[in-house]
Image (tube, rainbow, N blue to C red):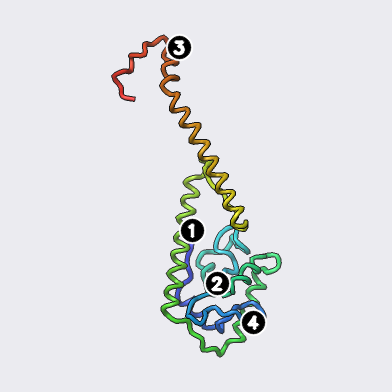
Amino acid sequence: MSRLAPKKDVLRALFARSGNQCAFPGCAQPLINNKNQFVGQVCHIEAAMPGGSRYNVNSCDEYRRSYTNLILLCYPHHIETDDADVYYADKLKEMKCAHEKLFEKSDFKIDEAELYKLSSEMERYWDNIEILNKFEHMGSGSGLQIEINAKATFFNILEEVYESIDGVQNLLKVLRKSDDNLVHDFYSLLDKKGLPKTIFEDIPY
């Protein structure tokens, strides 16, 4: 099943009960700034993909994008709560519940245009993830996959990419050399078999 972006009504409910603040205890970082821009993060309590924090193999994609499994955080606290040993699923659910109780009577509403924009961007994000997954499977076993550590620094990732590119370039050099020697090797094979070189002259190379 394809990864699913949260529905608009789910996002609307999340913001309505957020008080426009990060759900991390004691954090008052706004989710929508004074320019009506979304500067927070829509986070999964149980990860949407294998390998993510708190991924539950027994769950399903519909639950993963549900209201129950989503929490609004600022970027720094999104990164902090990726530590699943400290911030296990039930702890994040309790955090979300306690935060929402503080804003039960909040009248905050996300601008519908911003909601539409956010929803569209998340849909495009998951579509791109699906495309990348397909490419990953297409390249599986070819030896040409580029494995990236997403938690590495930018420069470390860049170094890994350059190393992979060098590997591809070396492979191309080997193939080019093999291609340059192909005719010579073919003629050598004909000689070993006692066949004249002219036998294939009417066939274009």
* Closer-to-camera residue (16/165): 165
User: Which marked residue is nearer to the observer: mark 3 or mark 4?
Assistant: 3
Question: Residue most toward the left?
Answer: 202
x and y, in percent, of residue 34 in the image:
51, 82
Which residue is labeled 1 in the image? Answer: 129
Q: Distance between the residues labelled 2 and 4?
A: 18 Å
Asked where in the image residue 19 lies, by quadrant, the reply is bottom right
Q: Mark 2, mark 4: which one is toward the viewer?
A: 2
Q: In this view, does 79 lie above or below 97?
A: above
Q: Give the label on residue 98, or none.
A: 4
Spot occupied by residue 43 in the image (x, y as percentages of width and height): 56, 70
**Residue position marked by numbered label 3 in the rendering:** 192
Mark 4 against mark 1, which lies toward the viewer?
1
What residue is shown at x 44% (from left), y 28% (from top)?
A: 179
Return the disc, 4 or 1, that comes first in the chain's sequence.
Answer: 4
At x 47%, y 57%, the residue is 130
Residue type marked 3: Lys
Secondary structure at badge 4 equals: helix
Q: Which residue lies furthest to the right in this view?
A: 86
Which residue type does callout 1 highlight?
Answer: Ile
Q: If the image is split into quadrants, where does the C terminus sit? A: top left
Residue matched to label 2: 41
Q: In which quarter of the image is residue 64?
A: bottom right
The vertical placement of 203 against 139, above or below, is above
Mark 2 / mark 3, whichever is N-terminal: 2
Mark-to-mark CA distance, 2 and 3:
69 Å
Vertical position of residue 135 compared to residue 60: above or below: above
Question: Is label 1 in a helix, a strand or a loop?
Answer: helix
- Tally of marks: 4
Image spot of residue 96 (x, y percent): 61, 78
Q: Nearer the viewer, mark 1 or mark 3?
A: 3
How far is the residue under mark 1 from the one under mark 3? 53 Å
